Amino acid sequence: MKHDTRKTILSLSNESFKHYLLLRYVDDSSDPKWKKLSFVSVELIAPEVWIQLHNYARADVESQGGRLIGYEVIDEKLVRHDSIRSNSWPADWMWVIQKRDN
């Protein structure tokens, strides 16, 4: 018997992904450290904080059998990234969240 696995895919621009991170991991947080970010302009949030929020999101999505992937265009080619490998926020990436439907 063939079992079809359905997947939900959400693709986000960089700014939309940041908004998603704030809504999902900051606004709903009970941790005062994260709650403080609710009152800070997006432009003033440090790259290290965005990367930490990205890592939370990646672990969260992977724990549900999904994937969080970043894409960027380099020399007119689409390049896929499974994680951020620097200390700076990749401002020109597009983000894809892929979740397995149960």
Image (cartoon, rainbow, N blue to C red):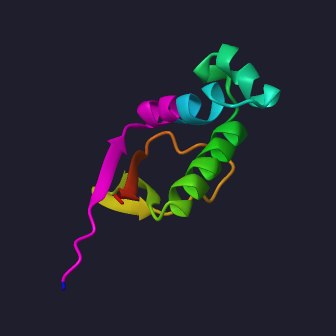
Q: Is residue 83 above or below residue 36?
A: below
Residue 10 inside the magenta-drawn segment: yes
Instruction: Tell me where residue 59 appears, x and y as whole percent.
Output: 60, 57
Residue at (73, 23) in percent of width and height:
35
Residue found farthest to the bottom: 1
Instruction: Tell me where residue 65 appears, x and y as whole percent.
Output: 47, 65
Looking at the image, residue 16 sits to the left or right of residue 84; the answer is: left
Nearest the eye: 55 or 92: 55
Residue at (62, 25) in percent of width and height:
27
Residue 40 seen by the camera: no
Residue found farthest to the right: 32
The quarter of the displayed image where residue 33 is located? top right
Residue at (59, 22) in percent of width and height:
42
Q: Which residues are magenta?
A: 2-20
Q: Quadrant of the C terminus?
A: bottom left
Q: Is residue 75 above or below residue 11?
A: below
Total numbered labels placed on residues in the image: 0
Residue 4 inside the magenta-drawn segment: yes
